[in-house]
Image (cartoon, rainbow, N blue to C red):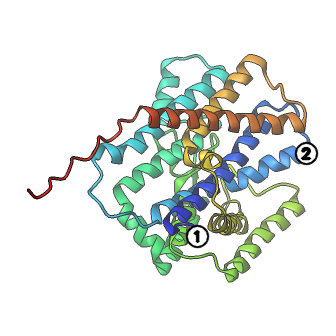
Amino acid sequence: MNNPSSTRLADLDLLKTLLVIGMVGAHVVQLITFRPRPEAAMFAEYANLVSFSGFLFAFGVGLGLPKPEGRQRSLWRQLRPSLLLLLAVYASSFAFALLVDRKKLDTQLIIDVVTMQRLFGWSEFLATFFMLSLLTLVARPALLAIGRTPWLLAAATLACLATTFYSTGAIVPLLPTLVSHTGFANFPLLAYLPWFLVGIWYASHPVRAWHFVPALAITGYLYWVTIQTGQFPNRFPPTILWIVGPAALLLGYLALCRFIAARIDIPSLLLTPGRHVLSFLVLSNIGFFATRYLIGKPVRARLVAALVTLAVLVLLSAGWYAWEMLRRATRPRPGPAPARSTPG
C-alpha cells in the first residue's frame, strides 16, 4: 500500500507532468511547426485551454496540502521561488524579444522587460506566476482561509471573474500581470485566481461524482459555443467562459491522477517534468526561440512534432535525473554512530 502522503505528492506531480507534456507539445506546434494541420492546431488550442488554468489549479492543490510541522523556513527559502521565477521571466522575455521578435537590445527593451510593463510571447504566464508567488508569500493564510471556506471561495470566485469585464491599454509596470490588457497577450492573475483557490479546496477534499455535473455543463457549453462560432471563446483578453471552460477537464485530470497514484507506484523519473515545471517551461521555450532564430519553422509533419515533443521531455528529464544522481553521489555521508559505552 502506498504511503498516503507520498501518494498525494505523486498525484500532484503526475497532474503537473500531464500539463507540462501538453504545454510543450502546444509550443512545438505554435512556435516551430510550419503550417500546422487543423488537428495539430486544435490540440494546441486544447492545451492552451487547460494549461494555465491547470497549473494554477495544481499549485493551489500544492499550497493547500498539509505541511509537516517543523521550524520556520528561513527568509531566503521563502524568497527563493519568487527570485527564480523573476529570473525565468527575464530569461524567457529577453530570449523571445531578441530571437523571435528580433528586437535590438536597447534601453526601452530593458525597461519593458525588467518592469514587466510589456509582456512578451510565451513568457507572459511566467510573469503572472511571479506575481502569484509574491501574493502567496505575503497572503498565504488569507488565501488558505478563502480556499477552505465555501462561502468565501464562492464570493472570491465571483469577484475575480467580474474583473474580466475590465481591460486596459495602459503601460504601467506589473499592471498586465494583474488585469486584462488590450495591447498584448497576458494572463491576468485576478481573472484566473479562482482556479488557484479551487485547487486549495481540492487539496483536502476528494473529487465527488456530483462535482462533474456542473463542471460538465460548463465545459459542454464551451464546446457548444465553439462549434457554433467556429472558434474558442476569446483568450486575450480572457472571457469568463474561457477561464471556467476547462472545469470538467481539470477535475477529470485530478481524479485520474489520484486514481492512478493510489494504485501504481509511479517511477520517479516519469514524474520529473511535474517536479521541475519551471525549468521545463523556460528551457524548452528558449530552445524553441533559438530554433526560430536559426532555422525558422522546421517541423512539417505531425509525427515529427510528436517526436520533437518527446525528445524535449526526455532530454530535460535525463538532465535532471543525472543532476540528482550526481548530487546524491557527492553528498557527504553520515559517519558511523559513536560506540555505546558498556557498564564496567
| CB atoms of marks 1 and 2 within 8 Å | no
At which x and y percent is residue 56? 56, 56
Mark 2: amino acid: Pro
Of 63 and 342, nearer the camera is: 342
Number of numbered tags placed on the structure image: 2
> Residue at horizontal 60%, vertical 25%?
95
Q: Which mark is residue 1?
A: 1
Pointer 2: what residue?
A: 38
At which x and y percent is residue 19? 67, 52
Of 329 and 337, nearer the camera is: 337
Q: Secondary structure at mark 2?
A: helix
Quadrant position of the N terminus in the picture: bottom right
At which x and y percent is residue 273? 62, 45
Mark 1: few, some, or many residues within 10 Å (few <14, many ≥20)? few
Say left or right for 168 vs 270.
Answer: left
Task: Calculate the distance from the C-alpha at mark 1 to the C-alpha at mark 2.
Answer: 44 Å
Of 249 and 208, nearer the camera is: 208
Q: Comparing marks 1 and 2, which lies closer to the viewer?
A: 1
In the image, residue 315 sits, relative to residue 168, either above or below, namely: above
In the image, residue 98 sits, relative to residue 34, either above or below, namely: above
Determine if residue 101 is in view: no
Mark 1: amino acid: Met
